[in-house]
Image (cartoon, rainbow, N blue to C red):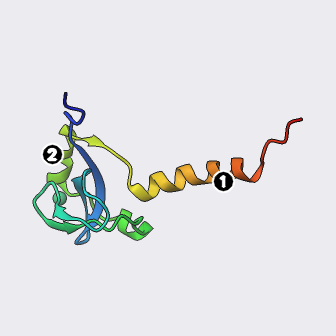
Amino acid sequence: MTTSARKTFRWWPVDHGRHAIPGELQPGDTGETLCRHPVTYLGIEPSKREWLYPTCQVCYERARDYTHIALAGHHYESVLPAQRRTEQQPQVTR
Ligand SMILES: [Zn+2]
């Protein structure tokens, strides 16, 4: 049984361009963008300026066959506040 039949990718700023990197890269890993550019995935959220880099057309075309997954940092940010809220308001039922 193959659980990862469909490949994943996420956008990542590399060399003043927005490229797609394999979703299996973990923070600190080195790999290649979909256009074969060497990349180190840091796992941190890129700056707003970096998100404005022009999208790499090669990556854009190849990423169509991939499933997009959010950056680890984005996922973390979206999950944490809700968890905190429930922790701060313990249900006291008698
Ligand atoms: Zn690219």
Is 88 or 79 nearer to us in this picture? Answer: 88
Q: Residue at x 22, y 41 (%)?
A: 66
The reply, left or right, for residue 33 in relation to residue 53 is: left
Residue found at the very far left of the displayed protein? 36
Query: In this view, which residue lies farthest toward the right?
Result: 94
Q: Secondary structure at mark 1?
A: helix
Relative to residue 94, is residue 79 depicted above or below? below
The image quadrant that residue 49 belongs to is: bottom left
Residue occupying the far top of the picture:
1
From the viewer's perspective, tell me whether residue 70 is left or right of residue 89.
Answer: left
Number of callouts in the render?
Answer: 2
Which amino acid does the dot numbered 1 rest on? Arg
The image quadrant where one finds the N terminus is top left
Q: Secondary structure at mark 2?
A: helix
Q: Residue at x 18, y 52 (%)?
A: 59
Seen in the picture, residue 33 relative to 68 is either above or below; the reply is below
Q: Earlier in the sequence, mark 1 or mark 2?
A: 2
3D distance between C-alphas at marks 1 and 2 = 38 Å
Q: Amino acid at mark 2?
A: Arg
Give the residue at x 27% y 65%: 41
Q: Which residue is mark 1?
A: 84
The residue at the point 16 percent across, 62 percent down is 31
Q: Quadrant of the C terminus?
A: top right
> Residue at label 2?
62
